[in-house]
Image: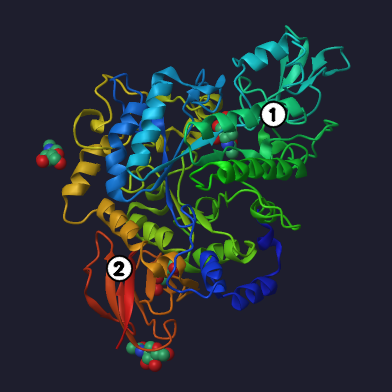
Amino acid sequence: MVAAQQLNRTTQLLLICSLLSIQAPSLSMSSLVGSQTEDFIDWWQHAVFYQIYPRSFKDSNGDGIGDLQGIISKLPYLAETGITATWLSPIFQSPMVDFGYDISDYKAIQPEYGSMADFEQLVHAASGLGIKIILDFVPNHSSDQHEWFKKSAARDPVYENFYVWEDGKKDKLGVRQPPNNWQSVFYGSAWEWNEQRQQYYLHQFTKEQPDLNYRNPAVVQAMDDVVRFWLDKGVAGFRIDAVNHLYESEDLADEPLSGKTADPLSYDYTKHVFTKDLPEVLTMVQHWRQLLDDYSAKHPDGVTRIMMTEAYADLHVLMDYYESADGVRGSQLPFNFHFITDVNGDSDARDFVYNVEKWLIYMPRGHAANWVMGNHDNPRVASRFGAASVDAMNMLLMTLPGVAVTYNGEELGMEDYREIKWEDTVDPPARNAGKKDYKKVSRDPERTPFQWSNASNAGFSTAAKTWLPVNPNYLALNLAAQQQAAKSHYKVYKALIELRKLPTLRRGRFSIEPQSRAVFALKRTLKDYDTLVTIVNVSAEEQLINLTDFINRPQKLIVEVAGVDSVYTPGQALSSSALTLAPHEGLICKLIAA
Ligand SMILES: *[C@@H]1O[C@H](CO)[C@@H](O)[C@H](O)[C@H]1NC(C)=O
Ligand SMILES: *[C@@H]1O[C@H](CO)[C@@H](O)[C@H](O)[C@H]1NC(C)=O
Ligand SMILES: CC(=O)N[C@H]1CO[C@H](CO)[C@@H](O)[C@@H]1O
Ligand SMILES: CC(=O)N[C@H]1CO[C@H](CO)[C@@H](O)[C@@H]1O
């Protein structure tokens, strides 16, 4: 999947050995100016970005659907947890075919989520609590209910070329066929016939999501206008959705077959060489970066407006988003999904180390790394790695250099609700897969309502029925219980955010090594400050390890953060030469001379 994996084993080992000790990106900046005390880190470079899925976060008006007033009511919770930036999944006007990823007006709020006044109140209240708001920007397609699409279908001269229209072909029997073999990500042809215009339009996702035509400068301008509109409302930046699907090759040639499946309607049937990761994508990302930089520079507050980009793509492609070979800057944060796509509960310590190193090896100097532990499109941490690993995974996330991204609910170790019935299933790819297969692809299990308390509907809503069922485990697994308990995933998470304020975690050098197949350790060091080590046992058995070589000399370990089930407590002194770790245990310690 990733190019690094195609390198032969020796090259990999050489790369890793030569880079076992890697400088944290932000440190290279401060050390360049010769200062160990001053903190030159911009607001976003070491932030925890907390992703809110608005539909499932908090319902304020009892209709079973989360909303903006719900989010406003929970801002104090975010502030108390130590969150300083949050990104919201789409809140724009939408027919909700794909839950907001099908937008019918980029400049309006979806009425079931609230009004523009609610949004303004949200930005204002968040700002008062020191929280920045990032919005999801979905440029790959609009809804077919968008005015632009209606006018395009009617061949209104201004909008005629806003979408990708084609005549199609006739087969031997004279029956009309789509222009080529491209398939939608969600199954079936990527082309839909439009009666009114008597042409096919392209849609890489559902047929209600026609692809915008970025080869038309008027589309680029219209989207720039959308970006400026929300910047003027006070947002600190955008998370750009599915950015690598923006362009398709102009000649519309058939894609080569992948050989992976015999089903010609499956997205896996072809290799997506003409519909994904085209070089034009990079130019557009750089264009948006310029727009954001210009805006930040001329705005009196001078706050950097940022862009985070979502693309499941080859590492080389992702690194160009940071900065191209000729030095043009793009996305501040091209999302790093390796903890989602390349490791799981069966991975051993070497797999974790390899995946961390891989990103840092390829990342151009002077940029901030980022680590995404979960999102609304993938199973939750507790379900991917096992419930026992929740604390260890959050410890890893929070002590790596750079930006940490948390999906709402992961601070509690919320679990996927895999038993959602077919009748309650709403995710489009799950509906497309049918009653027999929906569970394999459904994203509903990780989107169930946030579990605030043991009140009805987990305190999410007073409605008789919520838009997705609440996971019945909420009676035991909920925020209120975790706030009250002496030890909880939430308390560990909060302690980790507090720990991140240490200069060592903000600017310290970084190294990571497997200690065995079962255990890896990472180290953060900064001159004049205590060294911190994070140790994780990814195995299901107790492990005895000797960290003496990793930390250079015998030193005492003082526990800073321990997991819920740990026998260790903060402040306790441990021996570095004979340390016992319970199954799936993670531990963060400070080093002091023995
Ligand atoms: C519900 O939660 C409250 C507060 O966390 C707790 O005091 C109470 O015992 C819980 N009730 C049940 C039935 O678990
Ligand atoms: C730990 O490793 C160090 C350095 O290799 C060694 O000197 C020491 O004897 C080891 N301690 C134990 C308890 O194995
Ligand atoms: C990678 C990906 O599929 N991202 C989003 C792109 O748009 C579709 C359709 O709107 C969303 O469902 C995806 O989450
Ligand atoms: C996944 C993994 O590494 N498991 C290992 C955990 O530790 C035990 C005991 O050392 C090994 O037997 C497992 O293979």
Q: Is residue 367 visible?
A: yes
Q: Secondary structure at mark 1?
A: helix
So how many labels did they put on this image?
Answer: 2
> Which badge, 1 or 2, comes first in the chain's sequence?
1
In the displayed image of the protein, which residue is found farthest to the front? 300
Could you say which is closer to the camera, residue 49 or residue 569? 49
Q: Residue at x 79, y 36 (%)?
A: 255
In the picture, the disc for residue 221 is 1
Q: Residue at x 28, y 53 (%)?
A: 489
Q: Residues within 10 Å of mark 2 (few under 14, many from 20)?
A: some
User: Which one is closest to the eye, mark 1 or mark 2?
Assistant: 1
In the drawing, does residue 222 fall left or right of residue 30?
Answer: right
The amino acid type found where label 1 is placed reads: Gln
Q: Secondary structure at mark 2?
A: loop
Instruction: Name above or below for residue 344 compared with residue 131.
Output: below
Q: Quadrant of ligand 2?
A: bottom left
The x and y percentages for residue 239 are 54, 40
Disc 2 marks which residue? 582
The amino acid type found where label 2 is placed reads: Ala
Q: Residue at x 28, y 69 (%)?
A: 560
